[in-house]
Image (cartoon, helix red, strand yellow):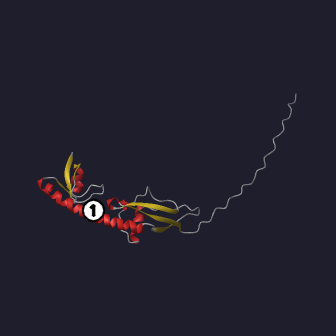
Amino acid sequence: MQHQVLLLEDLPSGARKGEIIKVKAGYARNFLLPKKKATYVDKRTVRMQERLKAEREKQAAEDLKQSKKMADDLEGKVLSHVAKVDPDGHMYGSVSAGDLVDMLSGEGFIIERRFVRIGGPIRTLGKHTIPLVLKEGVTAEFTLEVKPDKVIKPKKEEKKPVEEEAAPEEEKPAEE
């Protein structure tokens, strides 16, 4: 069964404040209504919808301005991360989206984890381009350089002893 609700806040799924959407009864009853993110649709809420849409447009303009400024500030930014490695240069662990959010907050950029668009955790050393999709669809990217915590010595190539090929035995004529 579906219910129509008027959103009082933006949702992570992309639904906007002031929209009337259909949702499953359990989602409305257990999440949206108790957290005051939505209300059931009736005559009063239809009148409230116009006010909410106007507020949302103002908020969208402000979010767009902030996102563009953050994207400009992040352009060309290179962050470094030191990772523990084994003697062969393989990382112990990885760098996740949560780690990237923490690194950015240390640099003064406050973003949410859902804005980081990496396919999965980073498990290799070197430079990685990290894409972000900020509020209002503004895209940005920065570079993450993952460095080892110690110097990695190149492996010495083991010299294999060259086996001398045994000369093929000559066939002896069969004795009669």
Q: Nearer the viewer, residue 38 or 34?
A: 38
In the displayed structure, would residue 173 be above or below residue 7? above
Q: Which residue is drawn at the image coordinates 45% and 58% (left, top)?
A: 121
Left or right side of 150 for 24: left
Quarter of the rendering occupied by the C terminus: top right
Q: Nearer the viewer, residue 53 or 96?
A: 53
Identify the residue under disc 1: 60
Q: Which residue is drawn at the image coordinates 42% and 68% (left, top)?
A: 103
In the displayed structure, would residue 133 be above or below residue 175? below
Q: Nearer the viewer, residue 32 or 75?
A: 75
Q: Which residue is drawn at the image coordinates 24% and 52% (left, top)?
A: 27
Q: What is the x, y in percent for residue 157?
A: 68, 59
Q: What is the x, y in percent for residue 31?
A: 24, 56
Quarter of the rendering occupied by the N terminus: top left
Q: Quadrant of residue 111?
A: bottom left
Q: What is the x, y in percent for residue 100?
A: 42, 64
Res 92 visible: no
Determine the residue located farthest toward the top in the rendered image: 176
Q: Could you tell me the amino acid type at mark 1?
A: Ala
